[in-house]
Image (spheres, rainbow, N blue to C red):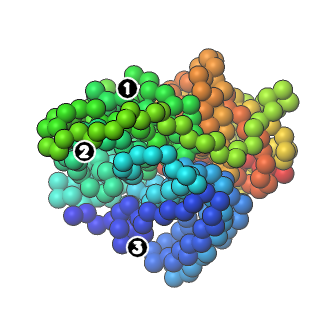
Amino acid sequence: DTDVWAFDGQVPGPEIRVRQGERLRVVLENRLTQDTSVHWHGIRLPHAMDGVPHLTQAPVKPGETFTYDFVCPDAGTFWYHPHARSFEQVGRGLYGALIVEEPSPPFVDREWVWVLDDWRLNANASLTEDFGNFFDMSHNGQVGNTVTINGRIPDRIGVRAGERIRLRLINVANARIFGPAFPGLRATVIAIDGQPVEPHLAADGKVVLGPGMRADVILDMSGRPGDSLSIVDGFYRQLPYKLVDLAYGAEAPLERPALGAVRLPANPLPEPDMARAERHDVVLGGGMMGGMMAATVDGKRVEMRAMMQQGLAWAINGVAAHGHTKMTPMLTLQQGQSHVLAIRNDTAWHHTMHPHGHSFRVLTREGQATSHREWQATILMAPRGRADIAFLADTPGDWMFHCHMLEHQDGGMMGIIRVT
Ligand code: C2O
Ligand code: CU
């Protein structure tokens, strides 16, 4: 057993389920000894409900409560987590799944929600308590030594031959990128970050999820009674590991006419008008081996060495953010206008960039058009990679834009996008 911080005494926190278009009302009561808040990751909601302390609401102090109350306009797989000292609060176990069901969900025999996390544990299973250390912050973020599905290290999960499973994957890890492969199964991705996508087989058979990302995957269990298969995650070439075994029971395969492909109905997202979109450059800089010499901190130019002494290592467009306060907008976007962010990762590390309040289409990666123009809320950027993303700025407010590798966020890789 590991001592954690938890919502309602459990890790993951309670799974919240609503129907698309329903109103969700959640009372947060802070029994921590530090400020907190709850952010509803990927949900398009009014600014005041977005859960960012100092930006969209006052921090919820120990002993205080705050009521979140909003409508969930998009069906899909979402999640929630604090937005205060996230590298510690999320890292200690504060997160949960938020599932918004389609009005008529596609037929499946079973649905699994897998909240994927990793932990850095001592031999006695206690947390190493080195949250926010400068080494993690300036390199990969905190990649742990123990991976869990829904807060446990599962050994095997039983399945039945012939059944169809909808697997909802949620990466809540501080910094680990997951890339599970499903050997022998046709793993069909039907949604990314909660948003429906043209059904397709995962590239290289791996469902790659940066921190904060989700995927809905259809698994048709095409093996025979008594078979088993290992789901292996080889995203990091030096660190492959077995996530879990799926074991077919002895029951006879389910008999029925072949099931068709699952295609989810589109969500009511505002389509960006590409003919009139404004283009903005977003350059990610810093980190070890990134060559960044200096950045602007609190309005002043600061050399990298001095930044490091303040616990900063990263910048967006040359600005390193220092906590959630005192940030000036990195971009000011006109409401009702379409925008392209041309994101360039000038660092030697992966990042998962997440703008709040809006989902976006991924138009290009490394200069090539994407095959599905997928909607996402969080984009995994390869080292030195590039991506163009587009969205219509429809909800006013000062919205966070940050790396979801939580140590990178704390180390300066965040900013504000103002929609006005
Ligand atoms: Cu999931 Cu700003 O966060
Ligand atoms: Cu990052």
For the residues labelled 1 and 3, the Cα–Cα distance comes to: 36 Å
**Position of 50 relative to 247 (above/below):** below
Q: Please state which of residues 376 and 327 is positioned toward the viewer in this rendering.
A: 376
For the residues labelled 2 and 1, the Cα–Cα distance comes to: 20 Å
Count of marks placed on residues:
3
Question: Residue 177: x percent and y percent?
Answer: 41, 38
- Name the disc covering residue 8, or none: 3
- The kind of residue tagged 1 is Gly
Q: Please state which of residues 283 and 173 is positioned toward the viewer in this rendering.
A: 173
Q: Which of marks 3 and 2 is in front?
A: 2
- The kind of residue tagged 2 is Val
296 displayed left or right of 220: right
For the residues labelled 3 and 2, the Cα–Cα distance comes to: 30 Å
- Give the residue drawn at x 63%, y 64%: 22
Q: Mark 1 points at which residue?
A: 205
- The kind of residue tagged 3 is Asp
Instruction: Say which element carries label 1.
Output: helix
Q: Earlier in the sequence, mark 3 or mark 2?
A: 3
Question: Residue 248: x percent and y percent?
Answer: 19, 41
- Name the disc covering residue 159, or none: 2
310 displayed left or right of 240: right
